[in-house]
Amino acid sequence: MFWKQRAKEFWLKEGDINSRFFHNAIKQRRRRNTMAGLRQNDGVWITDRGDMSTIVHNYFDELFKNDDHGQPKHIRGEFCQVTAEQNLALLKPICPEEVKAVIFYMHPNKAPGFDGMNPAFFQAYWDVIGPDISALCRTMFESG
């Protein structure tokens, strides 16, 4: 544990300045992130950068190729249909209890919303703002 803390302290001290430590860290990261080669489908290793680029291009080209129906082949047939019961459950209006349950399920100190308020605010003042929040959610679901 001591060495981990010491390394972190050294990184905080030396990691952001133009030092030998910084440049060695960059070199090490570059070596770790470099691909020396790619293996083709037939098992042959390719190390030429131009050929590697062609392999990657062909892989993604084949992955997202459209079939006769205009759908990418990797998602064709992956979706199940919604039953009539599920459709009714999805289409029913939301109730204030559902909105309250969602608000109180959230961790109080997580990221704030677009208004800058985190869930702790809504949980603390639910008695005051709950009806307005529920009405807002219902309006958003009904009108889009």
Image (cartoon, grey):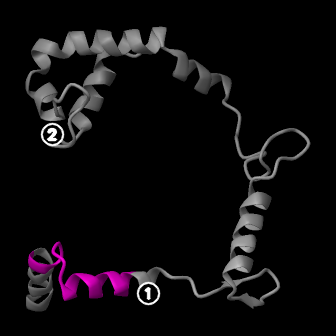
The amino acid type found where label 2 is placed reads Pro
Residue 134 magenta-drawn? no
77 lies above or below 96: below
Question: Which range is magenta?
Answer: 13-29
Q: Which residue is drawn at 21% across and 33% down?
A: 104
Query: Which numbered marker is on residue 72?
Result: none
Q: Which residue is drawn at 18% across and 33% down?
A: 119
Q: Which of 58 and 114 is in front in this view?
A: 58
The residue indicated by pointer 2 is 108
Residue 108 lies in quadrant: top left
Which quadrant is the N terminus positioned in?
bottom left
User: Predominant secondary structure in magenta?
Assistant: helix
3 lies above or below 58: below
| Left or right position of 25 against 139 | left
Residue 63 lies in quadrant: bottom right
The residue indicated by pointer 1 is 31
Q: Residue at x 47, y 8 (%)?
A: 143
Residue 15 magenta-drawn? yes
Count how many numbered circles sit on residues in the image.
2
89 lies above or below 62: above
The amino acid type found where label 1 is placed reads Arg
Q: Which of 106 and 17 is in front in this view?
A: 17
